[in-house]
Amino acid sequence: LRDLIAHCMNREAAVRVPEDFPLAGLTQAELDAFPVPLEKVDDILPLSPIQRLHHALAGSDRDVGFDQWVCRLRGRIDEALFEKAWQLLLARHDSLRTVFVDRNLAEPRQAVLKEVPFELQRADWRLLSRQHQETHLAELLDADRADGFSMNSAPLTRVTLVRTGRERWILVWSHHQAQVDGWSWPILAQELGAIYDALLAGREPQLPQPGS
């Protein structure tokens, strides 16, 4: 009996049913065949109209919905803490842990993952001349855009930090508009700064709950 109770209490071992994801509108057969392991999924949701558009066009042009932000920064940056700040930002927002899937489904869905891997990509160009730095930057941006994103692979965010001088940096943030739109990216940037400042000060970031 104890084994049976333990099995029923184990969410990863339990069979998931459509009622576990009430907004998804999935049948039991679709849930059983869901293309992402359900033990890794926090929630399943339908696509918004703009997300449907991005998903429909994704197969025809990998550049559709791809956004690339380039910022030139000055000052000292702790690269390890900066990477940690991004990891905490992704953990904080469901939208940044979302993938878009359609295999085995009548209609595409978005799956919010419990966690996603994130690694800050780094480069050091301090030994290059300004001209060569700009050449390398153009090549990096072209290659990054050519890589694009796979809608069913998380995260749909990629960050590169390039050191170009003692206290000079180039930040390249690539993301997909299905996750980050023109309204949300300033909020995310502000939160990233607050999280990074807190980590630098050796304290836990104190931010309101997303959406509050």
Image: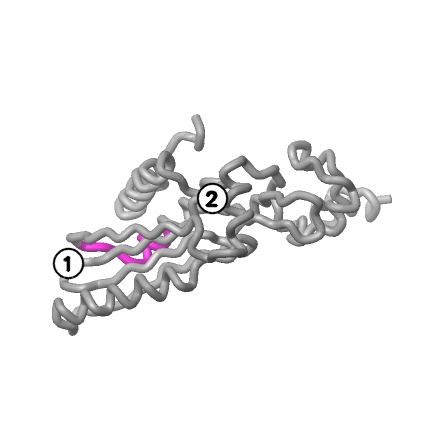
Q: Residue at x 40, y 30 (%)?
A: 208
Part of the protein shown in magenta: 76-84
Q: Which mark is residue 158?
A: none
Q: Is residue 95 visible?
A: yes
Q: Residue at x 36, y 62 (%)?
A: 144
Q: Which colour style is shown? A: one colour
The residue to which callout 2 is attached is 178
Q: Is residue 39 magenta?
A: no
Magenta-colored segment: predominant secondary structure: helix
In the rendering, at what x and y percent does residue 61 appear?
A: 47, 56
| Left/right of residue 92 with respect to residue 197 in the rendered view | right
In the rendering, at what x and y percent does residue 9 appear?
A: 74, 42
Q: Is residue 165 above or below residue 50?
A: below
Type of amino acid under label 2: Ala
Q: Earlier in the sequence, mark 1 or mark 2?
A: 1
Q: Quadrant of residue 204?
A: top left
**Label 1 crowd bin: few (<14), some (14–19), many (20+), radius 10 Å:** few
Disc 1 secondary structure class: loop
